[in-house]
Amino acid sequence: MHRHQPSHRRSGSRLFLLLLLLFPRRFRHAYREQLIEAYVAQRSETRYNGLSGRLRFGLDILTDTVLAALRRHATVLERKSRSSRSRRRRAATITKPGIGNMTSSVLQDVRYTLRNLGRNPGFTALVVLILAVGIGANVAMFSTMNQALIRPLPYEEPERLVLGRATFNGNINPLMSAYDYFDYHERNEVFQSLGAINFGPLDVTVTGGEEPEQVAGVLVSWDLFPTLGIPAAAGRHFTPEEGQPDGPAVVMLSGGYWQRRFGSVPDAVGQSITVNGFPLTVVGVMPPDFQFLYDADVWVPMRRDGPFAEARRWHNWLLVGRLKSGVTLERAQADMDVISAQLASEYPETNRDKALLLTELHEALAEDYRTSVFLLMGAVALVLLIACGNVASLLLARGSVRRCELSVRAALGASASRLLRQLLTESAVTAAAAGILGTALAVWLQQLILQIMPIDIPGMQGLGISGSMLAFAVILSATTGLLFGMLPAMRAAQTNVVEDIKSSARTIDSGGSRFRSALVMAQVAVSVVLLIGSGLLIRSFATLRGVNPGFETEQLLTAEIRLTQDKYAEAEQRVNFFTKLMEDVQSIPGVTHVALINQLPVRTPGNNIYVYAADRPPTNPTDRDVAFTRTVFPGYFDAMGIPLLRGRDVEPSDVADSPPVLVVNETMAQTLFPDEDPIGRQVVVDMGQDVSFEVIGVVGDVRISGPRYNPRLAMYGSYFQRPYYNMGIAVRTAVAPTSIARALRAAVWSQDRDIPVTDLSTMSDLIARTVSRDKVMALSLTLFAAVAMSLAAIGLYGVLAYYVSRRAHEIGIRVALGAGARDIVRLVLRRGVALVVVGILLGLVGAFWITRLIQQMLFMIEPTDPATFVTVSMFFAVIGAIACLIPAWRALRVDPLTALQTE
Amino acid sequence: MSDIPLRIRRLQPLRPAVLHILLVLSEGERHGYAVKQQVEQRTKGVVKMGPGTLYESIQRMVELGLIEEALQRRRRQGDQAQRRYYRLTPFGKQVLEAEVARLAEIVDYARSSLRRTKPA
């Protein structure tokens, strides 16, 4: 043991003390010291390092404690019932009421409760339903969070896996170049193995089957799968030789593709499939449930000096490493920093500001989702809190109705603690019913959550009922029961027998209503926070939707066309194919324009390259600008609705033999040639070696990476000078864009039946997809805020209505003495307005602090956006006023005669 | 004596936690957390015991008379005052032996039936 001092006083051990409360008292006293020591020791184990580790620790401890405590309680109960049975056998003893005979009186309480709840089925159903929805949403959200952020990844010893991302000047890129990867691979002393995976799936064409097939292929280093620790389901992994420049041509299949193409027969291994025209031998198959970062059908080994692996200046790879056992993340990072420094001095031109950042793999994968998931979790927790407030308020109101019943029981000899227990049993039974219903609801809800918010973390598909989810449901239901039951029960149990049995309608339950007022204020405050949060997200989403992408997005059908490398090896063949295709598509009825580009905006971002003005070479190579590079057919800008600001479009005369030309966007013209005429100037582009291009035109800016990202430097070359195999086509139509899909396919296939036409979708769909997460977040938070607001409004109404009914007598007297309508309304409103105003103010203060947590989800909106704060306050004030006015109106209708006659 | 096998049979099969605690304690006295560490080490982390499970099992085993607290143990340097040591009772040893014999039978049976099974 390393620690000699008991470290109980460290932060967190107070939480452990709380956990111990779950155990029966005797057990708790006997083992308190040992348990805390064990908690503290377990917390310091290496598998609980890092944020996700700490969350996992909390969950493990919680599950363990709940299960152990349940077992202990069961043992104690069993022993008690056995001993009481044997005692009864020996001699009939008189059982004392109260604490002494807990078990039988608890059963009695439960029976009484069930009868009592059954007598008010409407009330009970309402309470159970409110709570079940709240608990269900929380359990579902928790289960999603657990699966995404806490549960270990489904790999062997996942805590030793790290993700390596390139940084430039400390900014995450995140891709690293292949040559750098090879160096980190060879020089490091901290990794058991270090693999790499290409930046995304490539669409590859598999031929040789019944018809050409488009599948997703991912390039991986030969040792990626061993690094993850996933064995092949059939055959073997790649070998080191298969990563060498002239290694054997091989491929691995995904379990899914194996099943689709080969019906999962084992002798698929060793067969050959033709990928992009090259025959590759199948060496292995991965398990069907295996997926890493991208959906892939086939994996092809990364080859030194092969595709994407032939330079130090092109960044296409993510690194995945498995640390040697006992190596900490800090030590590994220090080792990487040493290698980065070596590389920087050896290759200053490319590596001066480059480094490799290591992050625990799970933490890195969860980064994207953490804010969304925490935000939704927080929102549903707040909604449940408000719901608890409403139920507590309902119970308080009922508590005054039940006063008489409770007093009678007290008069018959029930002690205060006995009554308290009776009332708490009612809450517990209600909460348990809500918990069971809520958990059932949660199983369904979590599927819904995943459908509207897809999360790409391995293992998310198998979301079902888990032990931790059930443990959470049990704890949440218990907490909920205590939360809404405790105060009403305590108030109700303090009965004054004599006063209450002769109770009159006039009794003013001042303590209870003060508590209910505080509840309403808190509810208003919490709803205001939620409303402001959703308001910010809505405004952000609206701004995002309103952004001008730089081209006309309506009436545009897009698709990808990929020529095979065997049939179209000559540049001329490709030029001819696309030239003819353009003419054919143009003549389809309903088509107005056709655009061809190698990477369509929004759909295929990326592909940056270094550029500088030829007459202004940078003194320092790292000061060069980076520009998107694209290749277009003549007519692209006109078809897309991108304005040509100066000069000319590319033309069929800009061919391979003529001087290379470029059309640049406005930002690029401004950046390279500030306040000068760019037309006719030379731009040097780093295409492996430096190549000079003449600028022939300037066009408007386009948000190439999607509406969220500001336009950056971009340039467009002539297809005739750089004829790619793969091109994106955008067809502008006068009719519904999808209606010409069939004709578009026919046009391609009239030239070559083997060319697939894929990824057909309209541009508006593509753009909607890029902002779908924002939409989901804005919608869900608005839904939660609306529920919260309605609950708060109902709570407010309830408090005021109760107030009016209690004061009917007093109001009657006032009216009889000549008070006008205005005075009566003022009397009621004063109370309501105070609650609303204080609640809104508290909410504004809370929102000011809380909304900065969602800053990174907001687009061009400050988290303290005054317009949102003011609008929400006004809106809530109106809702509050309506909730107050109804009781006020009822107060006006109090007839003084009837009110006084009730005496 | 004749009722002992019945007493033992009523406890079978042992929960994994109970079996592993008995195994560790059969080597000598240990304090609670050392038991947990040794179990995890011995099973290469396959059997993991949280603190709650550990002490709940210990308490249950004490109540069943499988183990007992070792009294009058001399405190070693660095031991904490409140640390309690546990050891096997004779009954615990009987239960462990019976359980191991039962498991051995299952393993024997499994081995022979595997040998008979021909690969598909």
Image: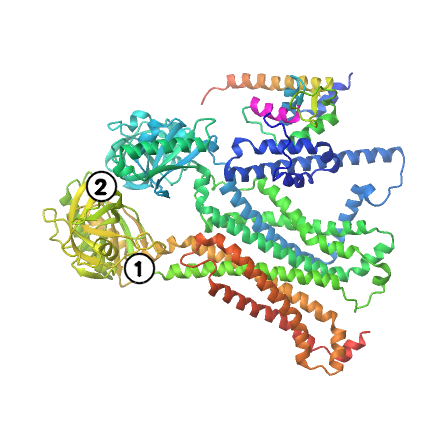
Q: Residue furthest front?
A: A619
Residue A534 placed where, x, y %?
Answer: 49, 59
Question: Toward the viewer: B5 or A893?
Answer: A893
Please rate how many residues cluster around mark 2, counting C-alpha atoms within 10 Å: few if below 14, some from 14 to 19, many from 20. Answer: many
* A510 on left or right of A838: right
Residue tagged 2: A564
Quarter of the image that includes the C terminus of chain A = bottom right
- Please indicate, yes or no, whether residue B5 appears anywhere in the rendered image: yes
Dot 1 or dot 2, earlier in sequence: 1
Prevalent SS, magenta region: helix
Asked whether A42 or A366 is in front, the reply is A42
Give the magenta-colored segment's residue range: B31-42
Residue A457 shows up from this direction: no
Check disc 1 and report the residue beneath it. A553
Amino acid type, residue under disc 2 in the picture: Thr
Vertical placement of residue B80 versus A19, above or below: above
Determine which quarter of the picture holds residue B59. top right
Percent x, y of residue A26: 75, 35
At horizontal 64% and vertical 69% (from top left) the residue drawn is A832
Picture residue at 66% right of the left edge, 61% below the top: A518
In the rendered image, residue A270 lying in the magenta stretch gets the answer no
Chain letter of the residue carrying label 2:
A
Q: Residue at x 72, y 54 (%)?
A: A487
Q: Nearer the viewer, residue A315 or A114?
A: A315
Q: Residues within 10 Å of mark 1 (few under 14, many from 20)?
A: some
Q: CA distance from mark 1 to mark 2?
A: 30 Å
Tag 1, which chain?
A
Q: Quadrant of residue A558?
A: bottom left
Residue type, mark 1 in image = Thr
Label 1 residue SS = loop
Left or right of B79 on screen, residue A408: right
Q: Relative to A773, say whether A793 is above or below.
A: below
